[in-house]
Image (tube, rainbow, N blue to C red):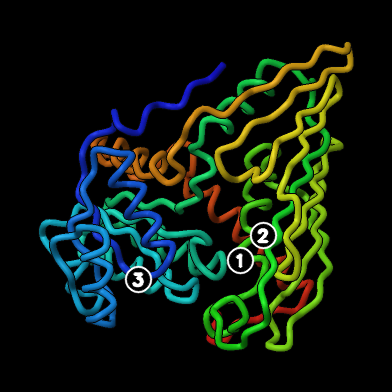
Amino acid sequence: MARTPDPRTAPSIRWGILGAGNIAAHFAQTVSAGTRAQVVAVGSRNRDRAERFATAHGIPTTHVGYRDLVEDPQVDVVYIATPHSEHAENALLAIAAGKHVLVEKPFTRNAAEAERVFAAARAAGVFVMEAMWTRFLPHVAALHQVIDDGEIGDVVSVRADHGQAFAFDPKSRLFAPALAGGALLDLGVYPVAWALDFLGVPDEVKAMGQLTETGVDGQVTMALRYADRAQADLSTTLWAKTPTTSDISGTEGFIRVDGDFYEPTSFTVRRRDGRSWRFEQPIARTFAHEAAEVARCVAEHVTQSPLMRWEDTVAVQRVMDEVRRQVGVVYPGEE
């Protein structure tokens, strides 16, 4: 069975966190506890928020505003944890300062913004990656090994859902068009990226959904079709907590991935010949694996991770662009 490297074996690296919200807090906690890296600085537009965050996570340096953070000489790599609408601008700011960058998912609002960020990274020669942390977890490496070994034959179907129940709040980033809210970019990016990880880029995308009162998508169902008879059945919603499981089915059997499929979890393999077995997820520190991958890539002087390439991010963004086009969601100021 494939093994994922222990995050604590990755080289040490110094992180600066851009943004001081909940996802940034989880990243700071996980990286400090699960890797050899140091979080040395945090930047926020609000001084009090930056100082509270730094105190809570033992971070020695605070910056008011993002420019000071990205220009801090003690920072090797910047983790961007701002709302989706700001990702491209923040990433370009860090790249211009010569910093390596990890951008929280979704990478940007759309594929055009993603391509602009990657073009800047290519010109600057810096490492950039979308923080699709699921791709670096032990159970995902094990799933790929099971499929590569032919245990379920040729994959013909991937099903995945991600729904969480949120009370409607027009001021929340989840429901705000100006902050690129909606179910798809915040939650649906996981099943979309999951399907593309196992099936590749689809030949056709079909979607339907309903919008919230603010005009962002509240619920979306997606079907991806592939020329080699494979399909993906994906769904996302802001209105209900769904099982958040996944089934990967092939000509010789299927794999049932426990919820939440995008977090460290276990799975069961059932073959047509009656044989079945279970992969039990070892202890894993969520974001530590992606942070360790960044550290390894930076130490090796490469600009992309082979597990989350730039073209992978752009492909996911293009699928979501098409889904939003069909559902009817446009964000203010989009290209």
Q: Check contact, mark 1 vs mark 2: CB within 8 A.
A: yes
Q: What residue type is labelled 3?
A: Asn
Q: Which amino acid does label 1 sit on?
A: Leu
Residue 83 horizontal/vertical position (percent):
46, 73
Query: Is disc 2 surrounded by few (<14), some (14 to 19) or many (20+) residues within 10 Å?
Result: many
Let me know if residue 189 appears in the view: yes
Residue at 82% in and 12% down: 275
Q: Check contact, mark 3 vs mark 2: CB within 8 A.
A: no
Image-based side of 218 in relation to 24, left or right:
right
Residue highlighted by disc 2: 188
Query: Is disc 3 surrounded by few (<14), some (14 to 19) or many (20+) residues within 10 Å?
Result: many
Residue 202 horizontal/vertical position (percent):
74, 48
Farthest left residue? 73
Q: Quadrant of the N terminus?
A: top right
Marks 1/2: CA–CA distance = 6 Å
Name which of mark 3 and mark 2 comes first in the sequence. Answer: 3
Q: Which of 279 and 75 is in front in this view?
A: 279
The image quadrant of residue 20 is bottom left
Residue at 20% in and 39% down: 12
Residue 142 horizontal/vertical position (percent):
59, 25
Image-based side of 72 in relation to 214, left or right:
left
Residue at 80% in and 54% down: 204
Q: Is mark 3 on a helix, strand or loop?
A: helix
Q: Which of marks 3 and 2 is in front?
A: 2
Q: Check contact, mark 3 vs mark 1: CB within 8 A.
A: no
Residue at 49% in and 69% down: 113
Residue highlighted by disc 3: 90
Marks 3/2: CA–CA distance = 23 Å
